[in-house]
Amino acid sequence: MVNCGSNCPIKVITQDGNVVRIETDLETEDEYGVSHQARACARGRSLKQRTYAPDRLKTPLRRVGKRGEAKFEPISWDEAAAIFVENWQRIKNEYGPKSIFPLYGTGAYYGFASRSAWLRLLNLDGGYLRYYGNYSWAQQNEAASATWGGGSTNGTALSNLKDSDLMLAIAYNPSEIRQSGSGEGYDFLNQLEQNNGLEVIMVDPRYTDSMLGKENSWYPIRPGTDAIFIEAIAHEMISSGWVEQNSKAFIDKWTVGYDKASLEALKTEFENSGDATKVDYVKYIDSDNNYHDYIMGVGRFAADGPRTAAKAAPICGIPETSIKSIAQKVMNARAPYIITGAGVNRHANGEQAMRACYMLPILTGKIGQAGVNNGALPSQFQMFRAGLPSGSNPVTESISHYNWIDAIERGTEMTGRADGVRGTPDMDTKLGANIKMLMGINGNILINQHSDCNKTHELLQDESKVEFIMVCDCWMTPSARYADLVLPDTSWLESNDLANDSYASGLMGNLTMMSAAIDPLWECRSMFEMCRLFAAKAGFEGQYTEGKDEAAWLEELYQATKSNARNAGTQPAFPDSYVEAQKIGLFKKWGDSGTIAFADNINNNKPFGTLSGKLEIYSTKWAKYAAEWTLDTSILGNTIDPIPKYQVTWDHYEDTETREKYPLLLVGYHTKGRTHSSYHNVGWLREAAEDAVWMNPVDAGARGLSSGDKVHVYNDRGTIEVPVRVTPRIAPGVTALGQGAWFLRNGPVDSRNGKPIDKGGAVNTITLYRPTPVGKANPQHTNLVEITRA
């Protein structure tokens, strides 16, 4: 029940009130395509160790040292309630509810006693500052919205791979990030097994576990260069005449922005529409800025030349002949399944990189056909689970999930035009408040999972800026170390609740009616109970509980879950009550509907969600952003363009100035031993999944390094100390480190950057805080570093 995309059921064996063993789904039928077992990965099977971890929080804590020192004293729940309510009310009354910010957090996905309990509490008395976006998909969601007016996880279901003859996967790694026995990774394996004739081409800086012989070809690519790789394929498709002969009719009917004629036609359509919004957008349409001319190097782009494979190869690291071969395979494919993983979007200007990748399926002209994807992540089935209502938030403004750092120091001045603030009357109305109270709820964003840990550390040290920090968690995480008040939550094994299968559980859904295996340990309380206590202290317990205790709320949520049409036909059938459902525990439903991306639009002539109603190669929305938003153009690559274009950014392979000092590209990846930062404190998993920086033998040899050597990975932002793993499974000039290790600012100061060495190995010690142009999102895979022996 963390943010891995799959909530796998587990069976807990207890003796005398203690957990003695964890088992997974081993008892139900196991037939893929009907109802298969949702077997948990190593993380789920380690829950005994995690529940009894030495750093488990046992009682409410009040800070007595500096933030980050982890010096606390235990206090009672009554004292905790007094501290929280006094600070909450004081800050709300002095600075307004926009000064209160619950940070993004995904460490527990419950229906009842989770984040919604806190939001419900805040909404009963003024509300809080909202956020939009997330650390996983923010830029790809912006790219998808610009291209087809929807989300980025609406791709063709993996079950349609049976109809495909080619899979081109860019940074797609389901076998590592979706390990569940009932998840996207399991679907991926089964579909490959069922279609032995499918050619699989993987493009990724790392040779991941999604390959290991399952692929026909692996092409190691330099991070941040996916766009120019795609542009070179596009050039092959256009210059050869293939697009004109095979897909131009589709492009003319369903897209705008491919060529000048389509944009001139769009201008005329908007001018004559009688729609004030469309008429207003005419001034933003520049027909000379079109995709065909950009790729071919003609018209406005004549001085730049064509986007050829010869131009792309030395930049992306994939040979010219290989690029041309891939292009030929795409053109020859009857039903190409092209997919781009989320790793591409977490880069500087990842919005443009994703838009570039989404262009390739459009150019094939086959979107909407069996076995063909639109470039997005695959659609999945998810069962419905009712949740505790959080109420209505009277605060309309929201900031990016990522730029809360800015809102601490200059929230009073932030606007929509310069900072992406939403919900204000216009782009120049200021947010009007600095963040003064931070709430870390089942998450580690406060320090560990946010960019530039050292920068955040210095900011949080200044108590005149953020006056109060509350963290609610089960363990003493790096974020908890910075809290003024730490509140101990109950773990999953101590909870009665409802959990559905989550957002990436593949084609079979499941619902778990959770039963507490053990009583709450020590003085831990559920989020619902602690918020009930705080509501009572503030004088509105009745409004918070609505006269219902935990059992009554769980029954109400169960009835809403049971009656939802999406859950019809579960096996076994739902019993009458929640208590009866707990005795059964697990409910399943095979939910593959054979989704083919955009088939409904194409086959039934339904408009897309863009302003034009078409697939917008030229984004009308981004054209307006480019004209009206304020961007710091002194930052390399910090631009918005209405057509997909390769961007050279800061800390990029082509950022030659920075590469003189820091020659190695470094990306993070999702290690199998953690879900983001969750489970880092489980010793079993630390032994099973090594935390080491990957380095190609060529780069290691040049530095005299061997596998197992302790190294320093550093740049101007910080230094981490980790082992090195020398392997040919990563491209030369590129390094990679599993993200989520816990920040530990405990080493000596590194004279090269003046920062204490992080011996915990958190990748965000060396990432840069710099919001992206459109989504104001996190570019945490864009890093240049040097590596030396420790």
Image (cartoon, rainbow, N blue to C red):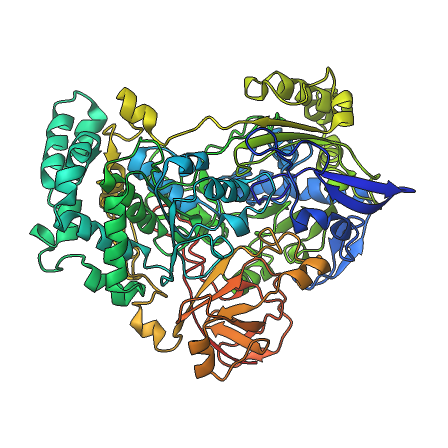
Residue 508 left/right relative to 254: right
The image shows a total of numbered marks equal to: 0
Q: Please indicate whether residue 767 sits to the left or right of residue 304 in the image.
A: right
User: Residue 361 is drawn in which quadrant?
Assistant: top left
Above or below for 394 versus 334: above
Location of the C terminus by quadrant is bottom right
Q: Where residue 217 sits in the image (x, y, percent)? A: 38, 57
Q: In this view, does 559 lie above or below 202?
A: above
Residue 747: percent from the left, percent from the top? 63, 75
Residue 554 in view, yes or no: yes
Q: Is residue 654 above or below residue 359?
A: below
The residue lying at 19 percent from left, 31 percent from top is 280
Quadrant in the rendering for residue 671: bottom right
**Residue 547 vertical position relative to residue 309 in the rendered view, above or below:** above
Q: Could you tell me if residue 721 is visible in this image? A: no
Of all residues, the one furthest to the right in this rendering is: 16
Residue 650: percent from the left, percent from the top? 34, 64
Residue lying furthest bottom in this view? 704
Residue in the image at 58% along x and 71% along y: 722
Q: Is residue 423 left or right of residue 146?
A: right
Residue at x 57% of width, y 68% of height: 692
Q: Nearer the viewer, residue 198 or 134?
A: 198
Residue 372 sits in quarter: top left
Q: Percent from the top left, x then y, of residue 474?
A: 72, 48
Q: Nearer the viewer, residue 214 or 390?
A: 214
Residue furthest front as drawn: 196
| Camera-side residue of 698 and 343 | 698
Is 532 left or right of 247, judged from the image as shown? right
Classify the position of the N terminus by image quarter: top right
